[in-house]
Image (cartoon, rainbow, N blue to C red):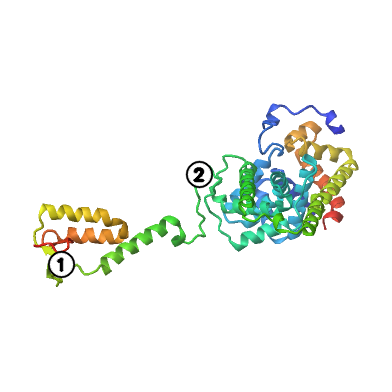
Amino acid sequence: MQAMQNFPPPDESMKSREPGDEDAGLPAGAEQSDLDLVRRAQQNERGAFDLLVLKYQHKVIKLVARLLRDPTEAEDVAQEAFVKAYRALGSFRGDSAFYTWLYRIAVNTARNSIASRQRRPLDYEAELSESEQNNVAARLKHDDTPEATVLSEEIRQTVNSAIEQLPEDLRTAIVLREIEGLSYEEIAVAMDCPVGTVRSRIFRAREAIDRALKPLLD
Amino acid sequence: MTDQIREQLSALLDGELPPDEMGLLMRRLEKDPGLRRTFGCYALIGETLRAPGGRIASPSFAACVSAAIDEAPVLVEKASTARPGATVQVPQHVALWKRPMVRTALAASAAVSAVLLFRPDVTPVAQLEVAPANSFTMSASPTPAQSQRLAGYMVAHSQFSTPMVRRNVLSSLLAADPGIARVSYEMGEAP
């Protein structure tokens, strides 16, 4: 982003994750935030787990959709992964990042789903007539570009457009946070302003983008 | 939903919310679906900026997960994906009798009680009337050969009895010693 050229690059302490990490790409503070929510969920505060689902639903569905042969099953498998994670939450001790742990569960669930499909005795398409096979092919072709994917593209364009229209201070704050992964304190140093201002700018940037997204999501 | 609360929500997503602000916000989140929607949207914005493209969750996805959890709300289960040796924390709301170790102990106690209270009559077998022609012949003092045969029989036929029955037989034999006669299962064997 253009705004980034005005600020020094983050030092090594800001970028401690290796490229291969499953949780690479999560901004600073996300792990602590997750840990707080996990601890609350472990105390049977269901709302805390709901927030973790809201936070990672898109990331897990993207991951699972890449692994499955039939991406139309992605939501079912992702749902199963979240339910498994909830049931196993008592065994999560926080030695790794929550998303790393969730990532493993999601991958295993996707693998199990693939394996169970392979074990099914009937070859579904072999049982269909030629005309029925054509219908299935047409449906699969349609599923290759499902509504969700189209919506995803619309969301991407809307978010980018909304960011372009933000005042520079808001745009810089949200970019440093979401793309560069800087903490509020690091952003405050970079933008030479108080931490409270950073918090407010990031919030206002999100609000503006949220308003732009609302017609798509409601 | 005020701007102040939504700003807290934004900070919560970033892990920058002071702990003293968290409790109240969590309670509000539980009651306010609009606030949860906003949180989901903030998360989506970040996800879209960091990794654009690909599938996204349908608007009802989180509600479906929540409903699926409500159907079987067992919080603790040792996941196959959990690290080996990981501690399983049992939540307080799980009734004591439902805990695995307690269940096992209760089952074992019940089994022992059943054996002790309802054990088949261990009347000395010497007093039993036995058809002389075809079956068990009793010996008040078994010979070493008979004892050997009995042990061999127990080993060879153990597959046809349950562990509980085997234990009962052995207990009976031990309890009977030395006053109770030993049984030789040798058909038609002369005393």
The three-letter amino acid code for the residue at tag 1 is: Val
- Observer able to see residue B57: yes
Q: Residues within 10 Å of mark 1 (few under 14, many from 20)?
A: some
Asked whether B12 or A178 is in front, the reply is A178
Q: Which residue is mark 2?
A: B86
CA gap between label 1 and label 2 equals 54 Å
- Quarter holding the C terminus of chain A is bottom right
Which circle marks residue B125 in the picture?
A: 1
Image coords of residue A39 (percent x, y): 59, 49
Q: Residues within 10 Å of mark 2 (few under 14, many from 20)?
A: some
- Provide the secondary structure element on which disc 2 rests: loop
* B55 on left or right of A106: right
Image coords of residue B65 (percent x, y): 67, 57
Identify the chain of the residue marked 1, using the numbered disc in the image: B
The three-letter amino acid code for the residue at tag 2 is: Ala
Identify the chain of the residue marked 2, using the numbered disc in the image: B
The residue furthest right is A165
Q: Is residue A38 above or below residue A28?
A: below
Asked whether A210 or A133 is in front, the reply is A133
Image coords of residue A162 (percent x, y): 88, 45
- Observer able to see residue B23: no
Q: Is residue B94 above or below residue A194?
A: below
| N-terminal-most mark, 1 or 2 | 2
* B97 on left or right of A45: left
- Which tag is nearer the camera, tag 1 or tag 2? 1
Do the residues at pointers 1 and 2 share their chain?
A: yes
- Provide the secondary structure element on which disc 1 rests: helix
The residue under the point 61% across, 63% down is B71
Image coords of residue A210 (percent x, y): 83, 50
Asked whether A155 or A190 is in front, the reply is A155
- Quarter holding the N terminus of chain A is top right
